Amino acid sequence: MTQPDDISPLALNRISVYLRCLRHLQAEGVSRIASQEMARRFHLSASQIRKDLAYFGEFGIRGVGYDVAHLRERLERLLGIQRLHPAIIVGAGNIGTALALFPGFHSGNFRIVAIFDNDPTKVGTELAGVTIRHSHELAPGIEETGAEIAILAVPAEVAQENYQALVEAGIKSVLNFAPVQLELAPEVRVKTVDLLIFMEELAYFLQ
């Protein structure tokens, strides 16, 4: 059986793209589709689709195509999103507020269950239907809500201490928006989103 660490991040990204396409197809009432048609409709590579899916098992039938509902269910199980994943946001500034209002975190498989900040003018107020709690309540808040994923949206200078607090509170996955390289704990999976790095990459190709 394929283990999580055996799968490259790029392959995981493509699986997420395929899953999004399958959701669109189901919404349109499409029950079966061939890799060539899926590639044509969503501007993908048919050979890459077949290669990626074959890596995880036999999903389709030659000459018949893929059962959309069955493939969607299998890919959701593969990604571990067949159930709800409660998440928290640490930092209710501009980025944290925007993420709290993101519709994808109020339906589907990810749900914001708590928000933390140390600004006394924000603590006790509501954001996207969730009451902002003080950062000192981080550990009990995680225990109460059963949160599994933390979104770190604090300034760079306090990112490490907040990350460490999350580690000590038992969080196992962190999506980091702080523009800093964190000193990581081996038992916690971290994904960093640095928008400036992406912009600099685009600038390179504009030369």
Image (tube, rainbow, N blue to C red):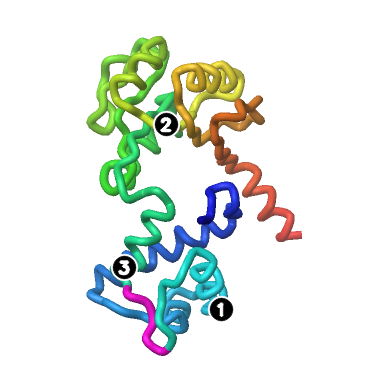
Closer to the observer: label 3 or label 2?
3
Left or right: 118 in relation to 106? right
Left or right: 151 in relation to 100? right
Q: Which residue range is magenta in the image?
A: 63-67
Disc 2 packing (10 Å; few <14; some 14–19; many ≥20) = many
Marked residue nearer the N-terminal end (3 or 1): 1
Residue closest to the far front = 1
Q: Which mark, residue 70? A: 3
SS majority, magenta? strand
Does dot 2 land on a helix, a strand or a loop? helix
Residue under circle 1? 47
Q: Amino acid at mark 1?
A: Ser
Residue 87 image position (x, y, % from top left): 37, 33
- Against 3, is 25 above or below? below
Q: Amino acid at mark 2?
A: Gly
Q: What residue is at 60 percent from the left and 52 percent from the top?
A: 6
Circles 3 and 2: CB distance less than 8 Å?
A: no
Residue under circle 2? 96
Disc 3 packing (10 Å; few <14; some 14–19; many ≥20) = some
- Residue at mark 2 to residue at mark 1: CA–CA distance: 39 Å
Does dot 3 land on a helix, a strand or a loop? helix
Q: What residue is at 27 percent from the left and 42 percent from the top?
A: 106
Q: Amino acid at mark 3?
A: His
Residue 37 image position (x, y, % from top left): 42, 83
Closer to the observer: label 3 or label 1?
3
- Residue at mark 3 to residue at mark 1: CA–CA distance: 20 Å
- Against 167, is 105 above or below? below
